[in-house]
Image: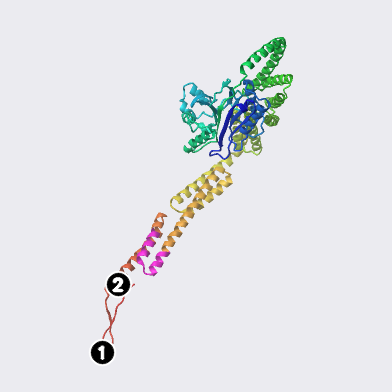
Amino acid sequence: MRKYNSSFKTAFISEEGSKLRNNDYFGFVELDKYACYVIADGITDMRDSQSARKAIEAVISAFHNEPGISRRKVGRYLKYANRELLQGKSYEKLKASITVVVTNYEKFRYGYAGNTRFRLYRDGRLILASSDMSLSQDLVEADRLEKDKLAKHEERNNLYSYLGKAHFRPAISKKKKLADGDIITLYTRGIWENIDEGELSDVFAETGNEPMEECDKVEDLLLSRQPENLDNYTFAAIYADKVFTDPNRKKRIRKIVTVILVIIILALIIGVAAYMWRRNRRQTREDMEQCFANVETYIEDNNYVRAKEECDKALELAGKLRDKEAEKRYNNYLICLEAVLQADDAYDEGKYEEAEDSYLSAKVRARYADNIALAYIGGRLGQIERYEQVFHNITLGDGLLERDSYEMAEQRYLEAKKDASAIYFTEGKQQALDALEKLYEAWGAAKDETEEQSAKQAADEAAAAELIRQGDAAYGEGDYDGAMVFYLIALEKYTKMEDAAQIAFLNKKIIALNEKQQEVEARMAEAKVFEELARMYEEQGDYEQAKLQYQYAKAVYEELDKPNKADEVQGKIDIVETKKEKSGEGAGAGESVGNGGSGNSGNKTVSGNVR
C-alpha cells in the first residue's frame, strides 16, 4: 500500500503558445506500488503531429504492462515508445523529445532523450538536473558556450538522440532516494527558451502546498515576457509531500538476503547453461544489428553490392532469432537493394531505358525501406536523362542532316558533344564525333552547289542591313512612318532568308516603333486638346487662359520635335497676345464717339468696352 502511505501531488499546464496546435503532451499514472510521469515535445513542422501523444501513450502502456523502477524497465519503456514512432504511419517521420520519471514512492529514476528537461528541488535548492542531448549542450560542457546563452543558441534543437531515431540511445539516471518535500519539475522548450534556470529556482525557493500555484507562477512569468514567437509550452510539478517509509524494511532486507543466497546457489547450477544460451543469442542479435548498421553505412557510401551482402546476413540472423519485425524490415531493404543492383547492371551495360524503369521501380520500393538510396536513385535518373538528351540531340541532328540543314545539324551535334563531355559520357561523345564527321563530308560536297545561293543571300543580307540602317536614320529624325516602311521591307527580306535572329530583332524594333508611334499619337492628341481648350477660351475672350493652353500645346510639339506645329501654335499665341492688348486698350479708354446728325438735334454719345 505504498501509494496510500505516501503523499504525492501533481499539477501541470500545457498550451499551444502562438502556434495553431499544441504538440506537447504530459501524462502520468499512479499505481499502488509505482507511479510514472511522462512529458514529450513533438519535433515536427506538421500542425497536427501526433508524435508526443503517441510517445506518451506508448510509455504509459508499457509501464502498465510491466511497472517497475529498474534501469532495464525504464529503458524498455523508452525503446518501446521509439519503436511505436518508427512504425507510425505518416508522410513525415514521427519524432519527439521525452522525459520519463518512475518512482516507488520512496526512490525514483528518470530517463530522457532530446531536450525536454527534468529538475529536482529540495529545500528550495536545485540539486539534480538532466542535460539536453544537443550540440549546444555539448558546446556548454566543452566550455565553448556560456550556459546562459544556451536557450537562444542556434544549435539548441540540433539533437543527437530523440524518439523516432533508428539508433536510439536514451539517457537513464541512477536510482535516487526521495525526501519529504522534494519537488520534481518537467518542462518543454517553450519554457526554458524564455525563462532561465535562476528564475525557475527563485519560483521554487519558497513554495506553497499546491503544485498548481507554482505552475501558474511559471506561466505568469513566461507570459510577462510577451515573446514574439512563443512555442508550445508544458510545465509539470510533482510534490513529494511525504515519501513512503517501510516499517518492515530491516526484516525484509534479511529475508531478501536469504532469498538472494538461495537464488545465487540455484543460479550457479543453471547459470552456465543459461549464460551460454543467452550469450549466444545476445551475440547473434549484436551480429544482426551490426550487419544492419553495415547495411546503412554501405548505402551511405553507395556500395550497394556490399550492402546487399550485409542485408542477407542480417536477414538470416533475424530468422534465427525469430524476430518477425526485423525480418520484415530487412526483407524490405533487401528487395529495394536488389532493384537498385538490377538497375545498375542495366546502366553499366548501356541499356538506359531498361535502367530507368528499374530505378523507378527501386524508388517505389524505397518507400517501404525508410526511403533509402533516394538521392542515389535520383542522381542516376538525372544522369540517364542527360544521356538521353545527348542521344536526342544526335537524333535531331540526323533528321536535320537528311533535310540538308547543315548548320542546325552541326549545332545539335556540337551540343551533344558538349553535353557528353560535360558528364564524361564517352559513348555519347564518340557518337557525336562520328555524326560530325559524316556531316562535314556531306556539307563539303554541298558547298560548291550553294556558293551562288550564298552570294545571293549575302547580297540580300547587305540590302536588308542597309534598309535597317535607313530605318534607324528615319527613326532618329522623327520620321516614324518612314522608319516603319524600311523595317517592314527589311523584315520581308529576312523572312525570305529565314533568318530567325534578324526576324526576332526586327520584330522587337517594330514593336518598339509601334509603341513610340502610339506614344507620339497620344501626346499629339493631348496637344490638340490643349489647342481646342485655347480656342474655346479665345472665343470667350479669356485670352490669358487661351495663351496658357496654347503654350502647353507648343511645349508638347517641341518635346515631340514638331517644329512646324510649334511655329503654327506660336502664331496663334501671337494673335491672342494682339487680341489681349486691344482688349486692354478698349476697356481703359472710356472715350465718347460722336456721330454727326442733321439740323439742331445735337450730338449723340456712345461709350462701351471692346472685348
Element class at badge 2? helix
Q: Is residue 373 visible?
A: no
> Residue 118: x percent and y percent?
54, 27
The residue shown at (50%, 52%) is 514
Q: Residue furthest bottom?
A: 599
Q: What colouring style does the render use? A: rainbow
- The residue singled out by tag 2 in the image is 587
Element class at badge 1? loop
Vertical side of 405 occupied by 272: above or below: above
Q: Which mark is residue 600?
A: 1
Q: Amino acid at mark 2?
A: Ala
First in sequence: mark 1 or mark 2? 2
Q: Is residue 241 left or right of residue 304?
A: left
Compare residues 403 and 379 and report the one nearer the observer: 379
How far apart are labels 1 and 2 at the CA level?
32 Å
Please tell me whether residue 542 belongs to the stretch shown in magenta: yes
Compare residues 117 and 282 and report the one nearer the observer: 117
> Residue 311: x percent and y percent?
69, 21
Start-end of magenta stretch:
532-554
Q: Is residue 601 visible?
A: yes
* Magenta stretch: helix, strand or loop mostly: helix
Q: Amino acid at mark 1?
A: Asn
The residue shown at (53%, 39%) is 18
Marks 1/2 in contact by CB < 8 Å: the verdict is no
Q: Which mark is residue 449?
A: none
> Residue 286: x percent and y percent?
66, 17
Q: Nearer the viewer, mark 1 or mark 2?
A: 2
Quadrant housing residue 238: top right
Compare residues 129 and 90 and report the one nearer the observer: 129
Q: Quadrant of the C terminus?
A: bottom left
